[in-house]
């Protein structure tokens, strides 16, 4: 049995300084992948995750870049390819989560959220796909969310983006499948992460009401979201493309 199924592969995981992105990066590292860690502001957080990757025996590259900037994303991919000789996996995980009634969303707010939550996924895929195509193998994963499938109020911009990244994954799946590339979305449910209470007002009590309504009666873990991503990159997931994998404890059953 191969204990390092991603040996020789290189993965970029955006937003990997904490929470879900960090867990994905570490899971890939455990499986032998080189990992490119990305964040926007906190170099120290990225450095900390890089040390964790190296402690697992993996190689890590940290890149501080705004993924809402197409040129910065291209430069990050170029740096990854120069360092590791290619690129095989990209996970778009960055998200800005604002809690605003629709009529209070300014044009600037709308543009900011779409640039970070949706355009960033396009920028990363566009920069990464030529390298995957050259290798005849690739995995594109977009972290979506319940908002794209069971919208909450006061989140119109995020609802649009979370549905949009799944639609983008389907478009990539159709266009690039013949080159051995799959594209999918992973939609987490309520997961134990650090959150800004301003934009998550129902998190103050640990999502008590929603937790009790879940069939599993508990919140998910970041490791469970990482496991879903690893499945999509594994041989077992190689025939899965253009899909959304809901990891939500049964909160919604689509």
Image (spheres, rainbow, N blue to C red):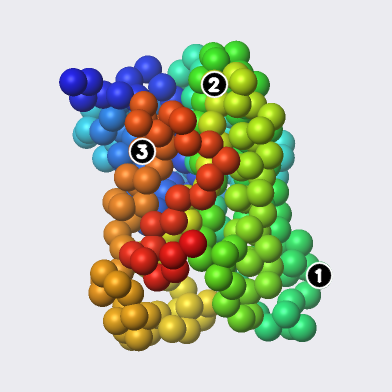
Q: Is residue 135 above or below residue 204?
A: above
Q: Is residue 135 above or below residue 167?
A: above
Using the numbered discs, state the Cα–Cα distance from disc 1 to disc 2 in whole angstroms: 39 Å
Residue where numbered disc 1 is placed: 107
- Residue extending furthest toward the front: 254
Q: Which secondary structure, mark 2?
A: loop
Instruction: Give the residue at x 63% y 42%.
Output: 170
Circle 2 residues within 10 Å: few <14, some 14–19, many ≥20: some
Q: Position of residue 232 (x, y in %)?
A: 42, 37
Instruction: Give the residue at x 60% y 13%.
Output: 134
Q: Position of residue 47 (x, y in %)?
A: 37, 42
Circle 1 residues within 10 Å: few <14, some 14–19, many ≥20: few
User: Does 23 sit left or right of 65 as displayed?
Assistant: left
Q: Which secondary structure, mark 3?
A: helix
Q: Which secondary structure, mark 1?
A: helix
Circle 3 residues within 10 Å: few <14, some 14–19, many ≥20: some
Using the numbered discs, state the Cα–Cα distance from disc 3 to disc 1 in whole angstroms: 38 Å
Instruction: Give the residue at x 47% y 84%.
Output: 201
Q: Quadrant of the N terminus?
A: top left
Residue 179 appears in the figure: yes
**As rendered, which of 180 and 199 lies closer to the eye?**
180
**As rendered, which of 219 and 38 lies closer to the eye?**
219
Earlier-in-chain disc, 2 versus 3 = 2
Mark seen at residue 180: 2
Residue 22 appears in the figure: no
Q: Position of residue 186 (x, y in %)?
A: 47, 50
Residue where numbered disc 3 is placed: 231
Instruction: Give the residue at x 46% y 30%.
Output: 239
Task: Answer whether labels 1 and 2 touch (C-beta < 8 Å).
Answer: no
């Amino acid at each position: 049995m191969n204990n390092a199924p991603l040996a020789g592969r290189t993965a970029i995981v955006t937003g990997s300084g904490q929470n879900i992105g960090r867990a994905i990066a570490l899971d890939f590292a455990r499986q032998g992948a080189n990992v490119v860690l990305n964040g926007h502001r906190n170099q120290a957080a990225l450095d900390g995750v890089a040390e964790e990757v190296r402690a697992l025996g993996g190689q890590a590259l940290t890149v501080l870049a705004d993924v809402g900037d197409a040129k910065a994303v291209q430069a990050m991919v170029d740096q990854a390819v120069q360092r590791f000789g290619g690129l095989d996996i990209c996970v778009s995980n960055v998200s800005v989560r604002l809690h605003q009634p629709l009529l209070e969303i300014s044009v600037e707010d709308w543009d900011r959220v779409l640039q970070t939550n949706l355009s960033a996924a396009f920028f990363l895929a566009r920069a990464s796909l030529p390298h995957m195509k050259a290798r005849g193998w690739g995995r594109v994963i977009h972290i979506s969310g319940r908002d794209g499938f069971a919208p909450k109020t006061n989140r119109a911009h995020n609802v649009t983006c979370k549905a949009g990244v799944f639609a983008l994954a389907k478009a990539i799946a159709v266009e690039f499948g013949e080159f051995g590339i799959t594209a999918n979305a992973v939609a987490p449910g309520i997961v134990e992460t650090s959150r800004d209470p301003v934009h998550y007002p129902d998190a103050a009590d640990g999502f008590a009401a929603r937790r009790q309504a879940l069939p599993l009666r508990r919140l998910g873990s970041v490791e469970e979201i990482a496991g879903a991503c690893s499945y999509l990159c594994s041989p077992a997931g190689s025939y899965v493309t253009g899909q959304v994998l809901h990891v939500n404890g049964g909160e919604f059953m689509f």
